[in-house]
Amino acid sequence: MDKPNHILRPGKRPGTYKKHVTEHIYEPPAASNSEVARVAAKQQNLPLNCFAAVPRGAEELAAAELAALGIQDAKPGKGGVAFVTDRAGLYRANLWLRTASRVLVQLALFPCSSPAELYAGAYAIAWQELITPDMTLAVDCSLRDSALTHSGFVALKTKDAIVDRIRESCGSRPNVDTAAPDVRINVHLHKNICTISLDSSGDSLDRRGYRLERNEAPLRETLAAAVVALTGWDGTIPLADPMCGSGTIPVEAALVAAQIPPGLQRQFGFQHWLDFDSGLWADICAEAEAGIRRLPVGLVTGYDLDNKALLLAGRNCSKAGLEGQIHFFHAALQEFSPEGDTGVVIINPPYGKRLGEEEDLRELYCQIGDVMKKQCRGWTGYVLTGNLELAKYIGLKASRRYVLFNGAIECRLLKYDLY
Ligand SMILES: C[S@@+](CC[C@H](N)C(=O)[O-])C[C@H]1O[C@@H](n2cnc3c(N)ncnc32)[C@H](O)[C@@H]1O
């Protein structure tokens, strides 16, 4: 089958459709051969077209995070950020991004309105250079506003093209493993344009590795990180969460202040790739570990009424590498009265999804307003809620409102200047 000329290669910016450069993935660098080492080093610096998927509302934050990693010109869009980087940048992005849920590396971009176009576009990628028959794979699909409307079908058709291409080249085909594949492939169809990418993250990046058990309504780690970033907290003044539950907000804040990369505890998809550079990865992790610092007592605190949630918070804190550095207290919101002239208080109250619950929660929201106004003078208050009706019961005027999504739930982060 002829290769269509619309395949984008790692190493080429969108719009250039020339030579396939993924051959470098198989290039075995021999330490004794300086020519091979030179070629391998050059390939490492090839630009990769990447897309960081981000919870809606946090795109600008993720672009700022990338800039802080030295990755310039990241382009925030709806639900993600497009950027170009090299292999080291890709590894760093996975290790350090706090607000992104995964980082995809684009392989191909082509018009696609039919199963045949999808198959041809997917088949044209030199999969045999990326996946061997003894590896496992999984294909994820998301689509909207396209002629092909069934994501399961699109994933299946893409998988067929991949395994056919590999079988033709290698004589046998890899198996599918949806739970723990060696290589995760992402197909995205939007307005009949298909993007096929390798998922460099594997498990979603909000799985930091520190959450051992789940409490009833834990905040997603990426969202908690986005909340902390939106407050502008820089670790120089105290941060308190009086309804901390399993401690996601205090833990994410403490990770920032301690300069601990959120991904230090976990594995990533790219570690299974054929071109994985373990030396480069070890250097990047060592560099990150060297920058970790211990937090002063009282900088980050959490409080809750529920002892079970506090137990989880303590465990999560230790597992995140912050043992003894966040102080958790059993206390009702009414008792919350933080020490110090200034600080940031972040509250993520329940928002009552079931009928009847909302009524019970009105009083709690009134209390939140009272406590912030009377017991947190000089601090800056933030409330994250998915229920705008209940938010009215806080009774204070918000100085800023940010829209964030907790999965499908549209939330507001409300800012209160507390004089
Ligand atoms: C939505 S959950 C917070 C989830 C948390 N952000 C997390 O990631 O696990 C709300 C928390 O408020 C606590 N809570 C409810 N009423 C409270 C009160 N009056 N005083 C203190 N905590 C309260 C609950 O125990 C629960 O853990």
Image (tube, helix red, strand yellow):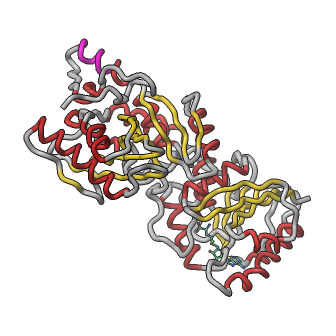
Please state, as top left, top right, bottom left or bottom right, where the N terminus lies in the image.
Answer: top left
Identity of the residue furthest to the right in this view: 419
Q: Is residue 404 magenta?
A: no
Please state, as top left, top right, bottom left or bottom right, where the C terminus lies in the image.
Answer: bottom right
Vertical relation: 245 (above or below) 45: below
Q: Quadrant of residue 209?
A: bottom left
Measured as percent of width and height from the top left, residue 111 is found at 39, 37
Towards the viewer: 362 or 148: 148
Measured as percent of width and height from the top left, residue 258 is found at 59, 47
Vertical relation: 277 (above or below) 393: above
Towards the viewer: 407 or 160: 160
Residue visible at 57% across and 51% down in the picture: 255
Identity of the residue furthest to the left in this view: 171
Q: Quadrant of ligand 1?
A: bottom right
Magenta region: 35-41
Vertical relation: 7 (above or below) 179: above
